[in-house]
Amino acid sequence: MPTTSLDVTSLSEAWAPVIHRPLEDGQARAYAPMFKALGDPVRLRLLSMIASAGGGEVCVCDLTGSFQLTGPTISHHLKVLREAGLVDSDRRGTWVYYRLVPGPLALLAGLLDVTKAAATV
């Protein structure tokens, strides 16, 4: 079941913090789904739960109890995170296990890194 619609390699080659130069149209279109995925409170919580899980991955069965949402709704939010390239998953029997994909998050963090600009102010 591993699916990722984002090519992190192509983004990292053209990557530069926004304080260095404006994003080109293609770059903005590539980053926007990741930011959009993180713009929902449920998805942001899910990502943080997956990222902080011991052992580097977490079963969907351990995520659903933290929300007052149906299983299909949680699955939809996880699908959005997966399609944005922020998490990956594997099916094991009846359960799906999720793990963080660190590359895209590092790109997003670097894209918004303004620490060098703040140091010169």
Image (cartoon, rainbow, N blue to C red):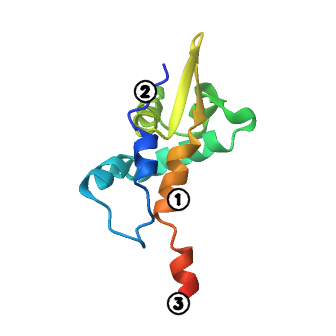
**Residue sitting at the far top:** 93
Which residue shows up at 47% across the image and 51% down it?
Answer: 41
Give the distance between the C-alpha atoms of the residues marked 2 and 1, in whole angstroms. Answer: 30 Å
Towards the viewer: 33 or 23: 23
Q: Are marks 3 and 2 in contact (CB under 8 Å)?
A: no
Residue 89 pos. (x, y %): 54, 26
Q: Residue at x 40, y 38 (%)?
A: 6
Residue bearing the label numbered 2: 72
Q: CA distance from mark 3 to mark 1?
A: 20 Å
Residue furthest toward the bottom? 121
Q: Camera-side residue: 110 or 89? A: 110
Classify mark 2: residues with Cα within 10 Å, few (<14), some (14-19) or many (20+): few
Front-most of residues 108 and 55: 108
Classify residue 66 as left or right of residue 4: right
Q: Is residue 66 above or below residue 71?
A: below
- In the rendering, at what x and y percent does residue 35 appear? 40, 53
Mark 3 or mark 1: whose residue is earlier in sequence: 1
Q: For the point 56% across and 39% down, which residue is it?
A: 101
The CA distance from mark 3 to mark 2 is 48 Å
Callout 1 crowding tier (Cα within 10 Å): few <14, some 14–19, many ≥20: few
- The percent coordinates of residue 81 (x first, y second) are 45, 39
Q: Residues within 10 Å of mark 3 (few under 14, many from 20)?
A: few
- The reply to whether dot 3 and dot 1 touch (C-beta < 8 Å) is no
- Disc 1 designates what residue? 109
- Amino acid type indicated by mark 1: Ala
For label 3, the residue is 121
| Image point (61%, 25%), residue name | 61
Q: Secondary structure at mark 2?
A: helix
In the picture provided, is 70 more to the left or to the right than 116? left
